[in-house]
Amino acid sequence: MSDETREAEDGEPVTHHEEGQEAPSDAVPLADSAFPAFDAAAVPPRPPLPAVGLSPSDAGAQIAVESLNTDEHNAIREQWKLAKDELGTHVSHARDQLDQANERIKQRTGRDLILAIVIGLAFGAALLGSLLFIKALFLPFALAGALLGIYELSRALRASGRRIDVVPQLIAGALLVFSAYFAELWLCWIMLFISVAFVIVWRLVAQMVVQDGRTYGDVLADAVIGGFVQIYVPFLAGVALILLKQEGGEWWVLGFIAIAVAADTGAYAAGLAFGRHPMAPKISPKKTWEGFGGAVVASLIVGALLAIFLLELPWWAGLIFGVSILLSATLGDLGESMLKRDLGIKDMSSWLPGHGGLLDRLDSILPSTIPALCLYFLLSPWATL
């Protein structure tokens, strides 16, 4: 049977030899020149396969669209990269300009403006939160401020040669602050007398125990200054707490603090921009009349706005409120500057970067508690005597 017949009958392809069968001995091997060396670089790239179900023309269009999308994607990436680099350049340039401006302001005013703003906003946010939500939370702020202020002032006075007993000052100050919030008004005055007498007697007894030959004039000055510390820091902080516990008192506390801060900010901005004429060169050379004018404008505006929108008062009452707090804040600022000049120091401490010490920020707020409490009883619709 021939190969063609066997293939037709079996339905299998015809091979010249079966699997495992050796090739015939007369087979001629192929020459190497028939299979030259394989060069992969010579192989053309494989074209993309057309999508299933598309005609050749549609497949070509899809390939062109994909190529176009790739080019657009690369172009968008380049644009984003250029925009990012340009934004980074602008940010770096703006940062350099801000640093230079801050350095010029620091040389002129002695304050780091950026740190001062950041710290001021942080303290302001905490204070505002306590007054808006639970006014009793203001008590820890007042107590901490009073105790830190006592310590700061006592340390500055001790550095100048005064004998100030820090521990008795802190004990008496804490009791005075607590009595202002929890006790009746008449008890606060009695507690003030007790606190002043306590620190004075402590100083006199301590001097008698030491017997170091200190003159009577120095001992008397130490005792009087010790009593002054109690009046200046914890008593004035207690007045703010007396105002706070009144009906609607939290808004008045917020109001007089806002006016004092506005006056300080207005004076700083106007003095920095237009300051030419010193206001009290022997006390504070950097305070100018132009700055005081800026403080007046800021205080009047803030006072009127607070009266209309917060305190339920007519606008003219807000002007009175603003002027009163402005005067007390200015006198308090000048008074603390006079005290620092007498002690030979620039700042009470360096605890608050950009501000100096805590009393350097409270010098205009503490004296403002007195007119704020008086105006509350005179002008407030909530006041009851």
Image (spheres, rainbow, N blue to C red):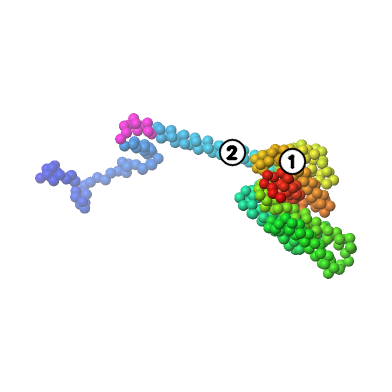
Instruction: Look at the numbered disc 2 and give the secondary structure of its residue.
Output: helix
Rendered location of residue 128, percent (x, y): 64, 48
Q: Which residue is mark 2?
A: 87
The amino acid on which the numbered mark 1 sits, given as a three-letter code, is Ile
Dot 2: few (<14), some (14–19), or many (≥20) neighbours within 10 Å?
Answer: few
Q: Which residue is mark 1?
A: 320
Magenta span: helix, strand or loop, mainly? helix
**In this picture, which residue range is highlighted in magenta?**
53-63
Q: Is residue 72 visible?
A: yes
Quarter of the view holding residue 107: top right
Left or right side of 191 for 83? left
Rendered location of residue 237, percent (x, y): 72, 53
Picture residue at 76% right of the left edge, 43% below the top: 324
Dot 1: few (<14), some (14–19), or many (≥20) neighbours within 10 Å?
Answer: some
The amino acid on which the numbered mark 2 sits, given as a three-letter code, is Leu
Picture residue at 37% right of the left edge, 33% below the top: 62
Along the line of sight, the residue nearer the viewer: 188 or 195: 188
- Marks 2 and 1, Cα distance to the nearest angstrom? 49 Å
Q: Is residue 111 visible?
A: no
